[in-house]
Image (tube, rainbow, N blue to C red):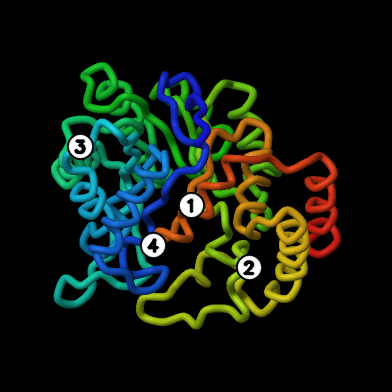
């Protein structure tokens, strides 16, 4: 496994990180707590030290709870990143409505969130603490000031933001002294490059932790047809590659990945992860999986790099089929 410094934080993270959104057991299909714990522990065994989570992953904090249980006795082996500011919408009988969230950065609410995350994770500090999304109601400044305060107090080692625009990131640097960002980035979702977010972070020594690096799974090459949306399968609501309008075109790009993977004797997922890691400034790519075997194959992407010719071929396939 390779490691890179996360911006100016002084924290070294594995170039492949484990994202735990799937462990929420309500968005990417059903997964048991035991399976979640097992894959987290497998990640540590493979040299993956970055475990990313959020209280919003699961209707009752399932992902954070699984992380806390998995790291019991192994906290010193992990870099934990978690988040604040996104909450599940409650429906009748206090049951969360699948796929529905609200954003709230009230300083009082954010303060309670940090304390609750510390308890669920079984730790007295968070390595990298993210604001999950901007808040158009309360604004971002109050929460950003808390990030700076908590860093001084040792409750967090570094503050960061996710899904922020360039102007919002500039303000976050000024008000919160953040060390990094978490944007969506994959071969099929390059908006964070096009809108200047990743180039700005790269130019200003901010760590870049990408999510959706496998496009919700389509870039693994494992899907023969889009997964059918259901009570616990909602990825098509977030990743538009699974929609009828884009499915065929995206799979033409996946065919290119399969071709390169076949020639190298690796998986399409490894090629996809390597494409993300080859983008200027990217520190680490988060991979969400619930299976140890798949995680091992994904982690192997850290052992090699795409050639200039292979990158050009992939980018040409994207331009031709996606535009």
Q: Nearer the viewer, mark 4 or mark 3?
A: 4
Q: Which residue is mark 2?
A: 221
Q: Which residue is mark 1?
A: 287
Q: Is residue 135 visible?
A: no
Mark with earlier residue (2, 4) = 2
Q: Which residue is mark 3?
A: 111
From this view, report whether residue 281 is shown above or below residue 104.
above
Distance from label 1 to label 4 (Cα)?
Answer: 10 Å
Q: Secondary structure at mark 2?
A: loop
Circle count: 4
Q: Nearer the viewer, residue 162 or 49?
A: 49
Q: Is residue 186 left or right of residue 66?
A: right
Q: Nearer the viewer, residue 195 or 73?
A: 73
Q: What residue appears at the point 70 percent right and 72 percent down from the top-left corner?
A: 246
Q: What residue appears at the point 60 percent right and 49 percent down from the top-left corner?
A: 273
Distance from label 2 to label 1 (Cα)?
Answer: 15 Å
Distance from label 3 to label 2 (Cα)?
Answer: 41 Å
């Amino acid at each position: 496994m390779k490691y890179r410094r996360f911006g100016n934080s002084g924290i070294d993270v594995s170039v492949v990180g484990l994202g735990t959104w799937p462990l929420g057991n309500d968005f990417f299909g059903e997964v048991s707590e035991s399976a979640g714990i097992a894959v987290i522990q497998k990640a540590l065994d493979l040299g993956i030290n970055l475990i990313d989570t959020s209280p919003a992953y699961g209707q009752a904090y399932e992902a954070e709870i699984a992380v806390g249980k998995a790291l019991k006795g192994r906290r010193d082996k992990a870099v934990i990143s978690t988040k604040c500011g996104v909450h599940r919408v409650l429906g009748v009988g206090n049951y969360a409505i699948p796929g529905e969230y609200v954003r709230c950065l009230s300083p009082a609410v954010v303060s309670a969130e940090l304390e609750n995350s510390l308890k669920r994770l079984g730790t007295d500090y968070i390595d990298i603490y993210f604001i999950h999304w901007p808040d158009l109601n309360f604004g971002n400044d109050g929460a950003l000031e808390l990030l700076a305060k908590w860093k001084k107090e040792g409750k967090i080692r570094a503050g960061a933001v996710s899904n922020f625009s360039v102007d919002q990131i500039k303000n976050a640097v000024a008000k919160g002294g953040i060390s990094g960002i978490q944007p969506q980035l994959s071969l099929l979702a390059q908006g964070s490059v096009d809108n200047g977010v990743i180039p700005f972070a790269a130019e200003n020594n901010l760590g870049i932790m990408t999510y959706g690096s496998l496009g919700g799974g389509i870039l693994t090459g494992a899907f023969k047809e889009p997964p059918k949306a259901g009570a616990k399968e909602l990825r098509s609501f977030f990743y538009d590659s699974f929609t009828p309008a884009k499915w065929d075109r995206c799979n033409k790009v996946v065919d290119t990945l399969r071709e390169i993977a076949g020639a190298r004797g690796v998986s399409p997922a490894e090629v996809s992860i390597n494409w993300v890691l080859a983008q200027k400034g990217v520190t680490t790519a988060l991979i969400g999986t619930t299976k140890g075997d798949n995680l091992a194959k994904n982690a192997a992407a850290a052992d090699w790099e795409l050639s200039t010719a292979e990158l050009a071929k992939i980018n040409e396939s994207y331009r031709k089929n996606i535009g």
